[in-house]
Image (cartoon, rainbow, N blue to C red):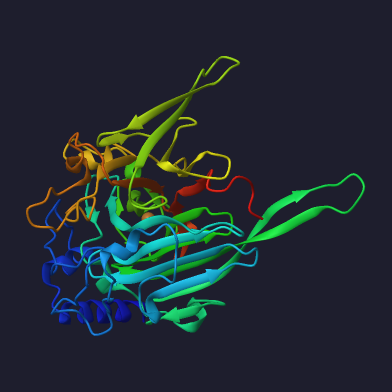
Protein backbone atom coordinates (compact mmCIF):
# COMPACT_ATOMS: atom_id res chain seq x y z
CA UNK A 1 0.00 0.00 0.00
CA UNK A 2 2.67 2.48 0.99
CA UNK A 3 4.75 1.53 -2.02
CA UNK A 4 1.77 2.15 -4.26
CA UNK A 5 1.23 5.58 -2.75
CA UNK A 6 4.85 6.53 -3.25
CA UNK A 7 4.81 5.43 -6.86
CA UNK A 8 1.58 7.33 -7.39
CA UNK A 9 3.16 10.43 -5.85
CA UNK A 10 6.18 10.21 -8.14
CA UNK A 11 3.92 9.87 -11.14
CA UNK A 12 1.91 12.92 -10.18
CA UNK A 13 5.11 14.93 -9.69
CA UNK A 14 6.53 13.91 -13.02
CA UNK A 15 3.20 14.63 -14.68
CA UNK A 16 3.59 18.13 -13.29
CA UNK A 17 6.49 18.63 -15.65
CA UNK A 18 9.19 18.88 -13.03
CA UNK A 19 11.72 16.84 -14.93
CA UNK A 20 15.17 16.36 -13.53
CA UNK A 21 14.77 18.71 -10.58
CA UNK A 22 12.01 16.61 -9.15
CA UNK A 23 13.64 13.34 -10.04
CA UNK A 24 16.64 14.36 -7.97
CA UNK A 25 14.73 15.44 -4.95
CA UNK A 26 12.48 12.40 -4.92
CA UNK A 27 15.62 10.27 -4.78
CA UNK A 28 14.80 8.20 -7.81
CA UNK A 29 18.55 8.15 -8.31
CA UNK A 30 21.42 9.53 -6.26
CA UNK A 31 21.81 13.23 -7.06
CA UNK A 32 25.26 14.33 -7.99
CA UNK A 33 26.43 17.48 -6.28
CA UNK A 34 24.93 20.54 -7.88
CA UNK A 35 23.12 18.58 -10.56
CA UNK A 36 19.60 19.72 -9.82
CA UNK A 37 17.96 21.71 -12.55
CA UNK A 38 16.37 25.00 -11.65
CA UNK A 39 12.60 25.27 -11.78
CA UNK A 40 10.97 28.34 -13.23
CA UNK A 41 12.03 31.67 -11.71
CA UNK A 42 10.04 32.65 -8.68
CA UNK A 43 9.16 36.04 -7.35
CA UNK A 44 11.19 37.37 -4.44
CA UNK A 45 9.98 39.12 -1.29
CA UNK A 46 8.06 42.27 -1.93
CA UNK A 47 7.39 41.47 -5.56
CA UNK A 48 4.26 40.07 -7.10
CA UNK A 49 4.58 36.30 -7.15
CA UNK A 50 3.37 34.63 -10.31
CA UNK A 51 2.69 30.92 -10.65
CA UNK A 52 5.20 29.06 -12.78
CA UNK A 53 3.63 27.84 -16.02
CA UNK A 54 4.16 24.21 -15.07
CA UNK A 55 2.84 24.59 -11.52
CA UNK A 56 0.52 21.88 -10.32
CA UNK A 57 -2.97 23.28 -9.76
CA UNK A 58 -2.71 22.64 -6.04
CA UNK A 59 0.26 24.97 -5.56
CA UNK A 60 -0.70 28.59 -5.19
CA UNK A 61 1.40 31.67 -5.46
CA UNK A 62 0.42 34.63 -3.39
CA UNK A 63 -0.19 38.18 -4.34
CA UNK A 64 2.24 40.32 -2.41
CA UNK A 65 2.17 43.96 -1.47
CA UNK A 66 4.37 46.87 -2.51
CA UNK A 67 7.83 46.51 -1.00
CA UNK A 68 7.46 49.84 0.77
CA UNK A 69 4.85 48.36 3.08
CA UNK A 70 7.21 45.71 4.45
CA UNK A 71 9.39 47.81 6.69
CA UNK A 72 7.04 49.88 8.81
CA UNK A 73 7.87 49.72 12.50
CA UNK A 74 4.27 50.26 13.40
CA UNK A 75 2.12 47.42 12.21
CA UNK A 76 -1.31 47.65 10.69
CA UNK A 77 -2.80 44.48 9.23
CA UNK A 78 -0.17 42.52 7.31
CA UNK A 79 -0.25 43.42 3.61
CA UNK A 80 -1.48 40.13 2.22
CA UNK A 81 -4.93 38.84 1.30
CA UNK A 82 -7.05 36.92 3.78
CA UNK A 83 -6.06 33.26 3.14
CA UNK A 84 -2.39 34.22 3.41
CA UNK A 85 -2.67 36.52 6.42
CA UNK A 86 -1.99 35.26 9.93
CA UNK A 87 -2.90 37.54 12.82
CA UNK A 88 -3.03 35.87 16.22
CA UNK A 89 -3.30 37.35 19.70
CA UNK A 90 -2.22 34.67 22.20
CA UNK A 91 -3.86 34.28 25.64
CA UNK A 92 -1.28 36.52 27.40
CA UNK A 93 -2.00 39.40 24.99
CA UNK A 94 1.06 39.01 22.74
CA UNK A 95 0.22 39.41 19.07
CA UNK A 96 1.96 37.98 15.99
CA UNK A 97 1.17 39.13 12.45
CA UNK A 98 2.68 37.66 9.30
CA UNK A 99 1.98 36.46 5.78
CA UNK A 100 2.70 33.06 4.27
CA UNK A 101 3.22 31.87 0.74
CA UNK A 102 4.12 28.54 -0.87
CA UNK A 103 7.07 29.14 -3.15
CA UNK A 104 7.92 26.57 -5.79
CA UNK A 105 11.57 26.44 -4.77
CA UNK A 106 11.72 27.17 -1.02
CA UNK A 107 8.31 25.79 -0.05
CA UNK A 108 6.62 27.46 2.92
CA UNK A 109 7.86 31.03 3.25
CA UNK A 110 6.82 33.46 5.96
CA UNK A 111 7.07 37.18 5.33
CA UNK A 112 6.52 40.51 7.07
CA UNK A 113 6.69 39.05 10.58
CA UNK A 114 5.60 41.57 13.23
CA UNK A 115 5.50 41.08 17.03
CA UNK A 116 3.46 43.20 19.41
CA UNK A 117 4.20 42.51 23.08
CA UNK A 118 1.26 43.14 25.37
CA UNK A 119 0.99 46.85 26.15
CA UNK A 120 3.84 47.75 23.79
CA UNK A 121 4.39 49.01 20.26
CA UNK A 122 4.47 46.63 17.32
CA UNK A 123 7.96 45.85 16.07
CA UNK A 124 9.04 44.20 12.83
CA UNK A 125 11.28 41.14 13.14
CA UNK A 126 11.72 39.41 9.78
CA UNK A 127 11.11 40.45 6.22
CA UNK A 128 11.09 36.78 5.24
CA UNK A 129 12.17 33.33 6.39
CA UNK A 130 12.20 29.96 4.67
CA UNK A 131 14.26 26.83 4.39
CA UNK A 132 17.34 27.22 2.21
CA UNK A 133 18.48 23.59 1.91
CA UNK A 134 18.24 20.09 3.36
CA UNK A 135 21.62 18.47 2.65
CA UNK A 136 21.61 14.72 3.34
CA UNK A 137 25.05 13.09 3.06
CA UNK A 138 25.27 9.38 3.95
CA UNK A 139 28.09 8.10 6.18
CA UNK A 140 29.28 5.71 3.47
CA UNK A 141 30.11 8.75 1.32
CA UNK A 142 27.21 8.24 -1.12
CA UNK A 143 24.58 9.38 -1.83
CA UNK A 144 24.70 13.07 -0.87
CA UNK A 145 21.33 14.68 -1.51
CA UNK A 146 20.30 18.30 -1.80
CA UNK A 147 16.62 17.87 -1.07
CA UNK A 148 15.53 21.42 -1.84
CA UNK A 149 15.33 22.43 -5.45
CA UNK A 150 11.57 22.42 -5.88
CA UNK A 151 10.22 21.89 -2.37
CA UNK A 152 6.92 23.68 -3.01
CA UNK A 153 5.87 20.99 -5.47
CA UNK A 154 6.14 18.32 -2.79
CA UNK A 155 3.75 19.97 -0.30
CA UNK A 156 1.25 17.51 1.15
CA UNK A 157 -2.44 18.40 1.36
CA UNK A 158 -3.11 18.35 5.10
CA UNK A 159 -6.14 16.60 6.48
CA UNK A 160 -8.11 17.74 9.49
CA UNK A 161 -6.30 15.32 11.84
CA UNK A 162 -2.94 16.65 10.64
CA UNK A 163 -3.76 20.12 11.97
CA UNK A 164 -5.20 19.55 15.46
CA UNK A 165 -7.03 22.53 16.89
CA UNK A 166 -5.96 24.71 14.00
CA UNK A 167 -7.13 25.93 10.65
CA UNK A 168 -5.87 24.70 7.31
CA UNK A 169 -5.02 27.35 4.73
CA UNK A 170 -5.26 26.47 1.03
CA UNK A 171 -4.80 22.76 1.97
CA UNK A 172 -1.07 23.03 2.61
CA UNK A 173 -0.55 25.16 5.68
CA UNK A 174 -1.68 24.57 9.26
CA UNK A 175 -2.06 27.54 11.60
CA UNK A 176 -2.60 26.46 15.18
CA UNK A 177 -1.89 27.29 18.83
CA UNK A 178 -0.06 25.05 21.30
CA UNK A 179 0.66 25.11 25.01
CA UNK A 180 4.39 25.53 25.76
CA UNK A 181 4.49 24.86 29.49
CA UNK A 182 5.22 27.33 32.24
CA UNK A 183 5.77 30.91 31.12
CA UNK A 184 6.82 31.57 34.74
CA UNK A 185 6.22 30.39 38.31
CA UNK A 186 7.14 32.15 41.52
CA UNK A 187 6.30 31.41 45.12
CA UNK A 188 5.10 34.09 47.48
CA UNK A 189 5.93 33.83 51.19
CA UNK A 190 2.54 35.19 52.24
CA UNK A 191 0.21 34.11 49.47
CA UNK A 192 -0.41 31.81 46.58
CA UNK A 193 2.14 31.19 43.85
CA UNK A 194 2.07 33.31 40.73
CA UNK A 195 2.30 31.28 37.55
CA UNK A 196 1.09 31.24 33.97
CA UNK A 197 1.11 28.84 31.07
CA UNK A 198 2.65 30.02 27.82
CA UNK A 199 1.43 29.48 24.26
CA UNK A 200 2.86 29.34 20.77
CA UNK A 201 1.35 30.29 17.46
CA UNK A 202 2.51 27.45 15.19
CA UNK A 203 2.63 27.59 11.39
CA UNK A 204 3.72 24.50 9.46
CA UNK A 205 3.55 22.57 6.21
CA UNK A 206 4.53 19.00 5.35
CA UNK A 207 6.57 17.93 2.32
CA UNK A 208 7.07 14.46 0.84
CA UNK A 209 10.65 14.17 -0.42
CA UNK A 210 11.29 10.61 -1.50
CA UNK A 211 10.75 8.32 1.48
CA UNK A 212 10.98 11.14 4.00
CA UNK A 213 8.19 13.43 5.15
CA UNK A 214 9.53 16.78 6.35
CA UNK A 215 7.47 18.87 8.76
CA UNK A 216 8.60 22.46 8.32
CA UNK A 217 7.47 24.53 11.27
CA UNK A 218 7.88 27.90 12.94
CA UNK A 219 6.62 28.49 16.49
CA UNK A 220 5.99 32.10 17.53
CA UNK A 221 5.88 32.25 21.32
CA UNK A 222 4.00 34.65 23.53
CA UNK A 223 7.34 35.84 25.00
CA UNK A 224 8.57 37.07 21.61
CA UNK A 225 10.77 34.08 20.77
CA UNK A 226 10.69 32.18 17.48
CA UNK A 227 11.61 28.51 17.08
CA UNK A 228 12.15 27.35 13.50
CA UNK A 229 12.43 23.57 13.30
CA UNK A 230 12.10 20.66 10.92
CA UNK A 231 10.84 17.20 11.81
CA UNK A 232 11.78 14.25 9.62
CA UNK A 233 9.34 11.36 9.58
CA UNK A 234 7.79 9.05 6.97
CA UNK A 235 10.13 6.13 6.23
CA UNK A 236 13.85 5.43 6.21
CA UNK A 237 15.33 5.47 2.73
CA UNK A 238 16.41 1.84 2.92
CA UNK A 239 20.06 2.31 1.91
CA UNK A 240 22.21 -0.45 3.38
CA UNK A 241 25.92 -0.48 4.01
CA UNK A 242 28.77 -2.15 5.87
CA UNK A 243 28.78 -2.22 9.70
CA UNK A 244 31.15 0.76 10.11
CA UNK A 245 28.72 3.12 8.33
CA UNK A 246 25.37 1.92 9.65
CA UNK A 247 23.31 0.14 12.25
CA UNK A 248 21.60 -3.24 12.03
CA UNK A 249 17.89 -2.86 11.36
CA UNK A 250 15.67 -5.90 11.43
CA UNK A 251 16.36 -9.42 12.71
CA UNK A 252 19.99 -10.18 13.59
CA UNK A 253 22.87 -8.31 12.00
CA UNK A 254 22.58 -9.08 8.32
CA UNK A 255 21.66 -5.66 6.96
CA UNK A 256 22.96 -2.31 8.16
CA UNK A 257 20.87 0.78 7.41
CA UNK A 258 23.19 3.65 6.48
CA UNK A 259 23.67 6.47 8.98
CA UNK A 260 23.40 9.96 7.51
CA UNK A 261 23.15 13.63 8.37
CA UNK A 262 20.33 16.07 7.79
CA UNK A 263 22.06 19.45 7.42
CA UNK A 264 19.25 21.95 7.32
CA UNK A 265 19.80 25.56 6.32
CA UNK A 266 17.41 28.40 7.06
CA UNK A 267 17.52 31.80 5.39
CA UNK A 268 16.38 34.66 7.62
CA UNK A 269 16.07 38.17 6.20
CA UNK A 270 15.88 40.21 9.38
CA UNK A 271 14.27 43.63 9.59
CA UNK A 272 14.55 44.39 13.30
CA UNK A 273 12.44 47.48 14.10
CA UNK A 274 12.38 48.42 10.42
CA UNK A 275 14.78 47.71 7.59
CA UNK A 276 17.46 50.28 8.41
CA UNK A 277 20.40 50.11 10.82
CA UNK A 278 20.45 46.37 11.51
CA UNK A 279 23.79 44.92 12.63
CA UNK A 280 24.75 41.33 13.45
CA UNK A 281 26.95 40.85 16.50
CA UNK A 282 28.62 37.76 17.95
CA UNK A 283 28.95 37.31 21.70
CA UNK A 284 31.57 35.17 23.42
CA UNK A 285 32.39 34.70 27.08
CA UNK A 286 36.07 33.93 27.57
CA UNK A 287 37.65 32.50 30.70
CA UNK A 288 37.02 28.78 30.39
CA UNK A 289 38.97 27.00 33.13
CA UNK A 290 38.96 30.05 35.40
CA UNK A 291 36.42 31.38 37.90
CA UNK A 292 35.46 34.39 35.77
CA UNK A 293 33.80 34.92 32.41
CA UNK A 294 34.33 38.04 30.33
CA UNK A 295 31.90 39.30 27.70
CA UNK A 296 33.38 39.86 24.24
CA UNK A 297 31.43 41.48 21.44
CA UNK A 298 32.33 41.18 17.76
CA UNK A 299 30.41 43.29 15.23
CA UNK A 300 29.94 41.75 11.79
CA UNK A 301 30.13 44.91 9.71
CA UNK A 302 31.17 42.83 6.71
CA UNK A 303 29.92 39.52 5.37
CA UNK A 304 31.16 36.76 7.66
CA UNK A 305 30.80 33.10 8.42
CA UNK A 306 30.95 31.76 11.97
CA UNK A 307 31.06 28.44 13.76
CA UNK A 308 29.32 27.39 16.95
CA UNK A 309 31.23 27.54 20.23
CA UNK A 310 30.59 27.13 23.95
CA UNK A 311 28.32 29.94 25.21
CA UNK A 312 28.52 31.66 21.82
CA UNK A 313 25.47 33.37 20.35
CA UNK A 314 24.62 36.10 17.92
CA UNK A 315 22.09 38.87 17.74
CA UNK A 316 20.59 41.13 15.10
CA UNK A 317 20.35 44.56 16.68
CA UNK A 318 18.80 47.79 15.44
CA UNK A 319 21.44 50.40 16.18
CA UNK A 320 18.93 53.23 16.58
CA UNK A 321 15.64 51.91 17.97
CA UNK A 322 15.66 51.48 21.74
CA UNK A 323 13.25 50.14 24.33
CA UNK A 324 11.91 52.21 27.26
CA UNK A 325 15.12 51.47 29.22
CA UNK A 326 17.23 52.97 26.44
CA UNK A 327 18.57 49.57 25.32
CA UNK A 328 18.83 48.66 21.67
CA UNK A 329 16.13 46.34 20.37
CA UNK A 330 17.44 42.97 19.14
CA UNK A 331 16.74 39.30 18.50
CA UNK A 332 19.24 36.73 19.71
CA UNK A 333 20.13 33.63 17.67
CA UNK A 334 21.16 30.47 19.49
CA UNK A 335 22.35 27.46 17.51
CA UNK A 336 23.51 25.14 20.29
CA UNK A 337 21.81 21.92 19.18
CA UNK A 338 23.67 21.11 15.98
CA UNK A 339 25.80 18.06 15.17
CA UNK A 340 28.10 20.50 13.32
CA UNK A 341 28.66 18.31 10.28
CA UNK A 342 31.78 19.18 8.28
CA UNK A 343 31.97 17.70 4.80
CA UNK A 344 34.78 17.36 2.26
CA UNK A 345 36.49 20.33 0.62
CA UNK A 346 33.97 20.47 -2.22
CA UNK A 347 31.19 21.01 0.34
CA UNK A 348 32.53 24.25 1.76
CA UNK A 349 28.98 25.28 2.67
CA UNK A 350 29.14 22.74 5.52
CA UNK A 351 32.20 24.41 7.10
CA UNK A 352 30.28 26.99 9.16
CA UNK A 353 27.13 27.08 11.30
CA UNK A 354 26.05 30.68 10.70
CA UNK A 355 26.60 32.90 7.68
CA UNK A 356 25.82 36.62 7.47
CA UNK A 357 25.40 38.12 4.02
CA UNK A 358 24.05 41.41 2.79
CA UNK A 359 20.64 41.07 1.13
CA UNK A 360 20.67 39.98 -2.50
CA UNK A 361 17.47 38.82 -4.11
CA UNK A 362 19.23 36.14 -6.17
CA UNK A 363 20.76 34.43 -3.11
CA UNK A 364 17.91 32.06 -2.31
CA UNK A 365 19.28 28.63 -1.44
CA UNK A 366 22.35 27.60 0.57
CA UNK A 367 23.39 25.12 -2.13
CA UNK A 368 22.33 24.48 -5.74
CA UNK A 369 21.10 28.07 -5.82
CA UNK A 370 18.91 28.28 -8.93
CA UNK A 371 19.25 32.01 -9.73
CA UNK A 372 21.05 32.71 -13.00
CA UNK A 373 24.11 34.91 -12.65
CA UNK A 374 24.34 34.33 -8.92
CA UNK A 375 26.74 32.33 -6.77
CA UNK A 376 25.68 28.72 -6.20
CA UNK A 377 26.20 28.26 -2.46
CA UNK A 378 26.13 30.24 0.75
CA UNK A 379 29.90 30.06 1.36
CA UNK A 380 30.31 31.95 -1.95
CA UNK A 381 27.87 34.67 -0.88
CA UNK A 382 30.32 35.64 1.84
CA UNK A 383 32.92 37.80 0.13
CA UNK A 384 33.65 40.62 2.50
CA UNK A 385 30.98 43.05 1.33
CA UNK A 386 29.72 45.61 3.82
CA UNK A 387 26.47 44.33 5.33
CA UNK A 388 23.76 46.93 4.73
CA UNK A 389 20.73 44.68 5.16
CA UNK A 390 21.69 41.43 6.93
CA UNK A 391 20.50 38.02 5.88
CA UNK A 392 21.40 35.28 8.36
CA UNK A 393 21.82 31.68 7.21
CA UNK A 394 21.64 29.11 10.00
CA UNK A 395 22.96 25.57 9.46
CA UNK A 396 21.68 22.94 11.90
CA UNK A 397 22.85 19.34 11.58
CA UNK A 398 21.27 16.16 12.92
CA UNK A 399 23.16 12.87 12.69
CA UNK A 400 20.64 10.12 12.16
CA UNK A 401 21.93 6.71 13.25
CA UNK A 402 19.01 4.41 12.44
CA UNK A 403 17.51 2.23 15.16
CA UNK A 404 14.96 -0.55 15.24
CA UNK A 405 12.29 1.91 16.37
CA UNK A 406 12.68 3.73 13.04
CA UNK A 407 10.84 0.82 11.43
CA UNK A 408 7.74 2.16 9.79
CA UNK A 409 6.45 4.64 10.53
CA UNK A 410 9.60 6.50 11.47
CA UNK A 411 9.25 8.54 14.69
CA UNK A 412 9.72 12.24 13.94
CA UNK A 413 13.25 13.49 14.66
CA UNK A 414 13.39 17.24 15.17
CA UNK A 415 16.14 19.78 14.63
CA UNK A 416 16.09 23.55 14.83
CA UNK A 417 17.31 26.61 16.70
CA UNK A 418 16.02 29.48 18.81
CA UNK A 419 15.51 33.18 18.25
CA UNK A 420 14.86 35.11 21.46
CA UNK A 421 13.72 38.67 22.02
CA UNK A 422 16.54 40.62 23.73
CA UNK A 423 15.63 44.07 25.06
CA UNK A 424 12.58 44.43 22.86
CA UNK A 425 10.63 45.42 25.97
CA UNK A 426 11.98 46.99 29.16
CA UNK A 427 10.63 44.14 31.28
CA UNK A 428 8.64 40.93 30.96
CA UNK A 429 5.55 42.09 29.08
CA UNK A 430 3.35 39.49 30.79
CU1 LIG B 1 17.26 10.61 8.74
Query: Can see residue 308?
Result: no
* Residue at 14% across, 60% down: 36
- Which of the 4 image quarters holds residue 229? bottom left
Q: Is residue 196 above or below residue 77?
A: above
Q: Is residue 352 above or below residue 366?
A: above
| 83, 24: nearer the viewer | 83
| 321, 182: nearer the viewer | 321
Q: Position of residue 246 (x, y in %)?
A: 36, 47
Q: Can you say which quadrant of the picture contains the C terminus? A: bottom right
Q: Can you say which quadrant of the picture contains the N terminus? A: bottom left
* Residue at 27% across, 79% down: 59
| Quadrant of the picture in which ligand 1 is shown | bottom left
* Residue at 22% across, 36% down: 386
Q: Position of residue 118 (x, y in %)?
A: 61, 60
Query: Can see residue 279?
Result: yes
Q: Is residue 34 above or below residue 216?
A: above
Q: Is residue 16 above or below residue 113?
A: below
Q: Position of residue 61 (x, y in %)?
A: 26, 76
Q: Residue furthest left?
A: 373
Taking the image as shown, residue 18 lies to the left or right of residue 131, namely left
Amino acid sequence: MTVFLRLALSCVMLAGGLGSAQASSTRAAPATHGAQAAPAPQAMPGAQATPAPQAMPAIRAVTGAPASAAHAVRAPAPPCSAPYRIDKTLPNGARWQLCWEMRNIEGLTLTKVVYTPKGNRAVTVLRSTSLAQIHVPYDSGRPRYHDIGALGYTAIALQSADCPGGERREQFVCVTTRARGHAYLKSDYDGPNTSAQGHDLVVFSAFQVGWYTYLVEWAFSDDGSITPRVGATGSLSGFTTTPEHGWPIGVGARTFETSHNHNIFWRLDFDVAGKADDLVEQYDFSGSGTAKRKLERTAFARETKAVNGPMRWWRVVDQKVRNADGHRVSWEINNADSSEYRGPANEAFTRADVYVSTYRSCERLATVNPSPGCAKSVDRYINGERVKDPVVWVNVGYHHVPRDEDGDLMPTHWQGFRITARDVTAKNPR
